[in-house]
Image: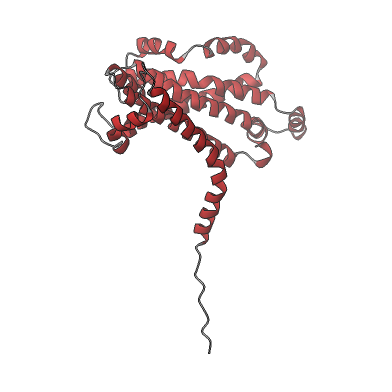
Amino acid sequence: MTTAQRRPIVNASENAFVTYVKKQIPELIPPLVAIAIFLFVWQLFSFTPGATLPGPIQVVKETWILIGWPFYDRGGIDKGLFWQVWASLQRVAIGYTLAAIVGIGLGILVGTSKLMSKALDPIFQFLRVVAPLAWVPIALAALRQNEPAALFVIFITAIWPILINTSVGVRQIPSDYNNVAKVLQLSKQEYFFNILIPSALPYIFTGLRIALGLAWLAIIAAEIVMSGIVGIGFFIWNAYQNNQVSEVILAVVYIGAVGLLLDKLMIWLEGRILPPEQK
């Protein structure tokens, strides 16, 4: 008798993961090569006479504790980079959520009413070009506290792209859709959920994506000015004041990485919500 040989059972999820990794390798090689070249050129410049910025090797040596132990907490503002970033992200989440709610609401109002558009558009265009740092002293003078002032700076910075893109999306609803709504005699509620929101959704997501990046930039600027609070912005300013340039560079790397992850998160969310024909 012959004994049937047992074939090894292959995990389907493991195979799928391996296949995904193999597909991603060609996409990862170009950016990895570009990063390696950038680090090499940066290191070469750090060797030039009179160079004031440390090279990547020196940055890693001088910030090894911060890199290896990002979760330490000694109380007060003496915390690891994870907690600094986490505090900033919490402020961004609150201010950005408020900006999204108000921005989408005002955008729909402006997009559906020509009178409101004529009345409010000049004000919006005037306020949206004000730099985030310019709002900091105004926010501090009005609110008297660092935390609400920081939230206001995030809100006032992030609201404009959401508002403007939403209003544009509402105005771009095809006339055929509006004609069908009139023929079918849709109620305002049915028109809002079945025609207006689905048609304007790609524009809304464009505004949300731009606003998320601006909100992250705004909290960094606000925290640099506001002293004595936990946050990555104040961490940068405090390190600069103490002439710890390597810590500043490391914090900048954290800022860029978190900003990239936030943008990828918004792209993923957009892909999950938007129907295929609107992507």
Between 141 and 178, the one lying in front of the other is 141
Residue 77 visible from this viewpoint: yes
Say left or right for 167 vs 6.
right
Quadrant of the rendered image containing residue 112: top right
Task: Name the residue: 33% across, 25% down.
Answer: 246
Name the side, left or right, on which 177 lies relative to 266: right
Q: Residue at x 61, y 38 (%)?
A: 274
Task: Name the outermost residue toward the left.
Answer: 74
What is the x, y in percent for residue 170? 66, 25
**Residue at left offset 55%, top offset 37%:** 30
Q: Position of residue 185 (x, y in %)?
A: 73, 33
Q: Residue at x 69, y 39 (%)?
A: 277
x and y percentages locating residue 55 in the rendered image = 37, 27
Q: Is residue 270 above or below residue 174?
A: below
Whole-percent x, y for residue 110 in the image: 62, 19
Q: Quadrant of residue 137?
A: top left
Tell me if residue 94 can be seen. Answer: no
Residue pushed farthest bottom?
Answer: 1
**Viewer-proximal residue, 148 or 249?**
249
